[in-house]
Image: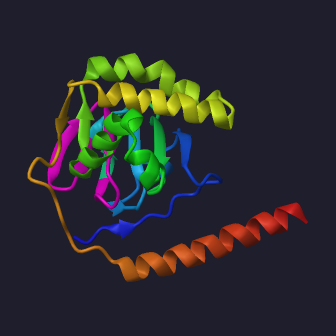
Amino acid sequence: MRPHYKPVQSDSHLFTCVLQESSEEFDYPWHFHPEYELTYIVTSHGDRYVGNSIENFFEHDLVLLGPNLPHCWINAADAQQNVRAIVIYLKEGFLDQTWMQSHELQCIHQLLKLSSKGIKFERKLALKMKERLFGLIRLEPFERLVALLRILNDLAQSNDFSLLCEQGFSCELDTINNERINKVYKYILNHYQQKNQA
């Protein structure tokens, strides 16, 4: 099945951090987007589909996905707790070429490259990151950026992870409709904001 393009709303040109607390936000069909995605499952369990990987997910599941890697999380029918997840979307140009080639960010650069195969971090590492990920939501923009870089750097320096698609994964993406949907989405978003400011 061909994945759907999902537009990601953001006021920032770098990244956005959201706390998802409803099944409507969480149960998005098999999809892709150009942003990197770091997802931490606070509550819920079910099946996680990433590329050609199918695994169960549980609380404290922490996964980093590269751009345009198709994925979805499906809640189990017997899940009794409401869905809660912290999701961080990093724009494609989150770290531009100059920054990416710097010695200081080399570890993060390697981590983001590896994310094209999907990275699942071990539960003990995810638990260490929990409060820091929650903290991102409460911080002011500059402090949030600094805190996020520290989180990514710590994840990059850990060996407590596995690759979800070790052989890599590729599929045909509908990039033509992707651009069309993106233009419509941006038009609606801009005009909606203008209406609210009037």
**Residue 73 included in the magenta stretch of the image:** no
147 and 81: which is toward the camera: 147
Q: Residue at x 36, y 18 (%)?
A: 127
**Residue 51 included in the magenta stretch of the image:** yes
Q: Residue furthest right?
A: 198
Q: Tell whether 8 sits left or right of 194.
A: left
Q: Residue furthest left?
A: 167
Residue 29 is situated, as x and y percent measured from the top left of the image, at 36, 60
Q: Tell whether 37 sits left or right of 121.
A: right
Q: Residue at x 57, y 77 (%)?
A: 183
Q: In what quadrant of the picture does the C terminus appear?
A: bottom right
Q: Residue at x 21, y 24 (%)?
A: 160
Q: Is residue 112 above or below residue 31?
A: above
Residue 23 is situated, as x and y percent measured from the top left of the image, at 46, 46
Residue 189 is situated, as x and y percent measured from the top left of the image, at 67, 67
Magenta stretch: give its range: 47-71
